[in-house]
Amino acid sequence: MKEILFRISRPYKVFNTKKVAALQLPAQEGDITILPDRAPTLILLRNGILKILDNQLKEVESYFVKGGIADVARDRCAVSSEKVFCVEGTSLERAKEKRDSALHEEDKIFYDYVISVLEKKK
């Protein structure tokens, strides 16, 4: 089965690069699933969860992203976001610390979102 070369980065740093079966992106207009051989597309992202999917379209890994863009063409997807971190490695306490120390209102809103997701997972 064909795979997608996926790269996720934040300013000045590549966060992860790997081959994946499929992705689900938090697009501005709603979640969108990216499969191999996709027509070239530039997608605006909202704050949300980017999911890496297996061949059965089941989630295998996920990342919180703070907005950004996804450049998709055929068998590659490059995501660039202001903030990126793994859902599985994020603690509720750390997210609350980040929210409370955030200098900008948009960062507080983002961390409020992260906190709400983590509280639902408890």
Image (cartoon, rainbow, N blue to C red):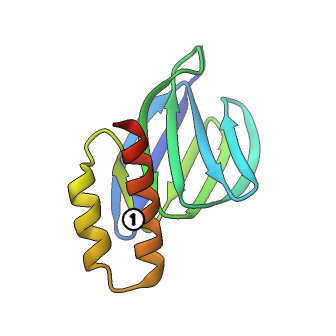
**Label 1 crowd (10 A; few <14 / some 14-19 / many >=20):** many
From the top left corner, tell me how far across and down residue 82 is, in percent: 44, 68
From the top left corner, tell me how far across and down residue 100 is, in percent: 28, 75
Q: Which residue is mark 1?
A: 111
Residue 45 in which image quadrant: bottom right
Residue drawn at 53 percent across, 53 percent down: 48
* As drawn, 89 above or below 44: above
Where disc 1 sits, the SS reads helix
Q: Is residue 36 left or right of residue 99?
A: right
Give the residue type at disc 1: Tyr
Q: Nearer the viewer, residue 99 or 28?
A: 99
Residue drawn at 73 percent across, 36 percent down: 38
* As drawn, 97 above or below 58: below
Q: Quadrant of the C terminus?
A: top left
From the top left corner, tell me how far across and down residue 119 is, in percent: 37, 46
Residue drawn at 70 percent across, 59 percent down: 28
From the top left corner, tell me how far across and down residue 4 is, in percent: 56, 32
